[in-house]
């Protein structure tokens, strides 16, 4: 998605150097994908090995000064999530951004994520609904592909902010697949407007720790 | 999705009695969801505890005589997948049915699943592509919401059967959400035709062990 496939991590004197996306080194990445020899290699790891790597990604990477550290986790409430929370606790994480799709099955999973956050003392910054309807590029009619409003209802129920809905957007999918720059190519797309508004709400609520 | 929420598992003299969907007891279910006291309870379990429960689901449930046992796993190649394969190995599982969505990010994950199957000696019965395009109910034009053909390309690359594509179908989503019977209500829907064809290919390739 970020055009970083095939890049590798190097050792520097302060630890692992992350992969930089741009010359200004304004976005740095770390992923188990950078450590694999072949892109289709399976990471057949049990919990303890995953937990150890997650700790290393926090402590052994030469992150330098960061405004924000974003950790993208799989769905669930298992080893990865516990290890991430434990590794980041000394740095007082701002909170969890919880993403759901509109249908009841997904909302049910996310209710359990919210319980997990409460149990582990992680603040929930808000809920985002993804895949919220599809605007047909042929007739401009919008259809709820899944159902509608599950994310907002859940946010009300749980008493956390609802940050917005991101529609299914073929232009976004295509630019991600082809490695183009979505923001430059489709500044008028509905997904871009939705994502910008969500990002702004998060920035407003969580000021970066700038020096 | 199966209208079994809120049902509970009972102890019988041969072990745990699964949850039956119909009076004829032709479909029986087991899920960690049936063991939770509250539906939003988080299953904050590390690998070893999950592995133990997966083994119990195979050995301690009074399954009776089954034609097919279907295990729906999360994506990935971790504890759940290893525990499932280990628990089922004595029963010589027919194989893995691998589901992907069309976009490159998902296809990349699934390549790693295929490597995992090869490493663990599990036959791959075939690949199914889900969320393959959306037919607008307003103008009947079909749009590739994600990209197109990723599943079929992957099957060719891996030398395994491609079993078919299932389109995004709002009728299927709605019946799942509302607990209606999709097959009875929408026998003409494109998703139903696709799912029937895939099921038939699997049945043809893997005869049930009938008494």
Image (tube, coloured by chain):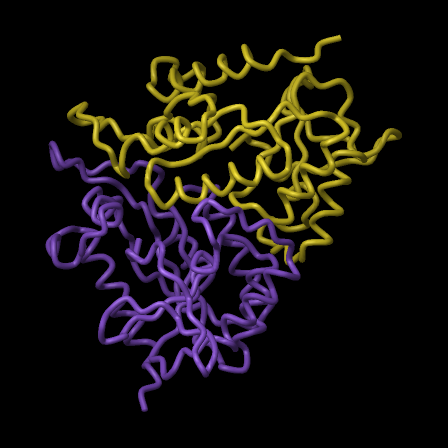
Chain colours: A yellow, B purple
Kindly indicate the quadrant of the structure image that contains residue B133. top left
The quarter of the displayed image where residue A4 is located: top right
- Image height of B171 relative to B83, above or below: above
What residue do we see at 66% from left, 43% from top? A82
Q: Position of residue A86 (x, y in %)?
A: 72, 38
- B69 left or right of A36? left
Query: Picture coordinates of residue B148 (x, y %)?
Result: 33, 43
Above-or-below relation of A205 to B35 = above
Is A98 above or below relative to A56? Answer: above
User: Of residues A125 and B14, which is closer to you in this image?
Assistant: B14
- Residue at 32% of width from left, 30% of height from top? A132
Question: Quick one: which residue is furthest to the top in this view?
Answer: A211
Q: Which residue lies furthest to the bottom in this view?
A: B211
Asked whether the viewer can see residue A174, the reply is no
Q: Quadrant of residue B21?
A: bottom left
Name which residue lies at 48% across and 78% down: B15
Q: Identify which residue, B36 or B86, lies in the foreground.
A: B36
Q: Is residue B108 left or right of residue A12?
A: left
Q: Can you give x and y, in whole percent of width and height, for residue A48 in the image? A: 73, 54
* Residue at 23% across, 63% down: B197
Residue A211 seen in this snapshot? yes
- Numbered disc total: 0
């Amino acid at each position: 998605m970020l055009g970083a496939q095939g890049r590798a991590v190097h050792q520097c004197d302060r630890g692992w150097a992350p992969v930089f996306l741009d010359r200004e080194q304004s976005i740095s990445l770390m992923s188990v994908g950078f450590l694999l020899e072949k892109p289709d290699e399976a990471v057949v790891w049990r919990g303890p090995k995953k937990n150890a790597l997650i700790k290393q990604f926090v402590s052994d990477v030469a992150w330098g000064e960061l405004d924000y550290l974003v950790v993208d986790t799989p769905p669930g409430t298992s080893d990865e999530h516990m290890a991430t929370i434990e590794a980041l606790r000394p740095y007082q994480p701002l909170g969890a951004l919880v993403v759901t799709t509109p249908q009841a099955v997904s909302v049910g999973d996310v209710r359990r994520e919210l319980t997990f956050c409460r149990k582990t003392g992680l603040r929930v910054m808000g809920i985002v609904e993804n895949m919220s309807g599809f605007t047909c590029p042929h007739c401009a009619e919008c259809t709820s592909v899944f159902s509608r409003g599950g994310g907002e209802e859940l946010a009300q129920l749980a008493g956390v902010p609802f940050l917005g809905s991101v529609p299914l957007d073929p232009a976004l999918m295509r630019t991600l697949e082809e490695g183009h720059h979505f923001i430059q190519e489709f500044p008028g797309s509905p997904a871009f407007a939705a994502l910008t508004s969500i990002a702004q709400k998060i920035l407003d609520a969580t000021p970066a720790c700038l020096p």
